Amino acid sequence: MIPWLDTQTPFPPVALALSDPNGLLAAGANLSPERLIEAYKQGIFPWFNEGDPILWWSPDPRMVLFPDELKISRSLRKTLKKQPYEIRVDTAFKEVMQGCAAPRNAQAGTWISPRMIAAYTRLHELGIAHSVEAWSDDQLVGGLYGMAIGKMFYGESMFSRFTDASKIPFAHLVKQLKRWGFGMIDCQMNTPHLASLGAREISRDEFSHKLSNLIAQPEIIGFWQFDHDLFE
């Protein structure tokens, strides 16, 4: 059994998360900015289907990317030099979430519900959640979103309508975060796509230890702007 949280109940220690399903920690509470920030500071994130209770997770192991370990394939590097897309930051946050929520590969639904979009858009308005976007002819063709606390970035989801239209914003994000001194990017779950970019699994204990140090470092609050020479 997992605990049921009301709006004031603190999260249980992440060590109490279930092993099956991996990382399930608690249910209930709400998606207020305060609750979400409290969760992410402890390495906890919400993941649930529309119509179900809010479920909170802290899996072990945890998929992360260290900025120094970003892998850019030869073909992607060539594409980056061609600059096929205009990269914008924090100009279409809600639209990026909606792009991530669109059905993929004949999937019927998504966990990125209108409720989740509203919650993270509020974090964006507070300068905590961010989007990195690929544009072509003034059309949004790909991107990603996540949130930052201290020098920790939590990646949430990405989408692509054209070739490499998610990989290119991701590469720009990682390069910029490295310049700003960010130490780790949370990727949550292991996927071949993330592994191909250099992400790897670490234990929850190691993740929690690194996280506690990174979230205590100075924050960059507000809408972001990226340097223009990241891949020159």
Image (cartoon, grey):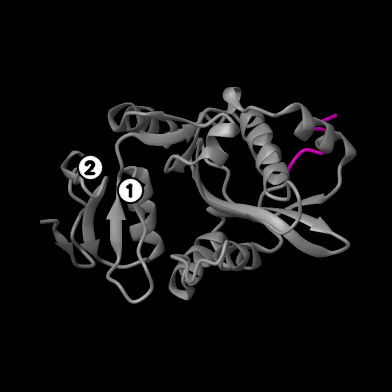
Residue 102 falls in image quadrant: bottom right
Q: Which residue is mark 2?
A: 14
Q: Which residue is mark 1?
A: 44
How crowded is the residue under tag 1: few (<14 C-alpha within 10 Å), some, or many (20+)? many
Front-lying residue, 130 or 50: 50
Q: Amino acid at mark 2?
A: Val
| Percent coordinates x, y for residue 123 in the rendering | 50, 61
Q: Is residue 138 above or below residue 183?
A: below
SS class, disc 1: loop
The answer to whether 197 appears left or right of 212 in the picture is right
The answer to whether 12 appears left or right of 45 in the picture is left
Does 66 appear in magenta? no
Front-lying residue, 12 or 97: 97
- Per the model, the C-alpha gap separating discs 2 and 1 is 8 Å
Q: Which residues are magenta?
A: 226-232
SS class, disc 2: helix
| Percent coordinates x, y for residue 103 in the rendering | 56, 68
Identify the residue at horizontal 51%, vertical 66% (top origin). 107
